[in-house]
Amino acid sequence: MAITRRELLKAGTAVVAAAAIPFSLRRSAAAAALDAGDGVQLAWDGVALGALTRAAFAEQVRSGFRVRLGVRRSVPARLVEVRDLGAADGPTECFALRFRTTRRRADLPQGTYVVEHRKLGRFPMFLVPMGLQRSGRYYEAVINRLRA
């Protein structure tokens, strides 16, 4: 039985996405799946994750986000860059988001965090530390998924 390249990309994207989100969040996301009429769209805390596209983030460059560290603690962050990583006409949408914390002491380890934004809502995101500069600490999230 031969597997097509598209099937392999779909399966690989699903595995990577599932591995990046802790089990408790995956269970919550699966329970909150919404029927969009033309299929099932994954949602988390009322946010349709498919709506978090490169264009949606590009509109929010220089706006404030909050990275939740728990129920009562969070770190303010600013989206400073949205960078394309893939072909614009390819089957996948691949882009990187670069955030800067507003506090130099906010040293977040690599991991999945709940990120909040006043227009985009609350959603899980895997953040990777990218280093400390005079202006603050930088973190990056890479989004890679099949286009709808």
Image: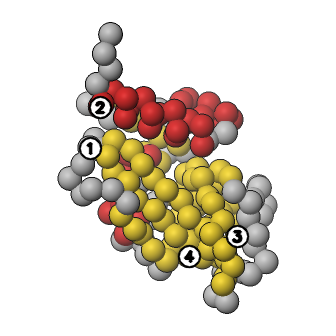
**Residue to which mark 2 is pinned:** 6
For image coordinates 49% across by 56% down, the residue present is 142
Q: Can see residue 35?
A: no
Q: How far apart are the alpha carbons under marks 3 and 4?
A: 10 Å
Asked if the residue under mark 1 is in contact with the one under mark 3, i.e. CB atoms within 8 Å, the reply is: no
| Quadrant housing the N terminus | top left
Furthest residue toward front: 2
Q: Which mark is residue 75?
A: 3
Q: Secondary structure at mark 1?
A: loop
Amino acid type assigned to the residue bearing label 2 in the image = Arg
- Judge by depth and name the residue closer to the eye, 90 or 40: 90
For image coordinates 76% across by 69% down, the residue present is 107
Q: Which mark is residue 91?
A: 1
Amino acid type assigned to the residue bearing label 4 in the image = Arg
Residue 68 pos. (x, y %): 69, 60
Q: How far apart are the alpha carbons under marks 2 and 3?
A: 38 Å
Residue 29 pos. (x, y %): 55, 36
Which badge, 4 or 1, comes first in the chain's sequence? 4
Q: Which mark is residue 78?
A: 4
Which badge, 2 or 4, comes first in the chain's sequence? 2
Q: Residues within 10 Å of mark 4 (few under 14, many from 20)?
A: some
Which badge, 3 or 1, comes first in the chain's sequence? 3
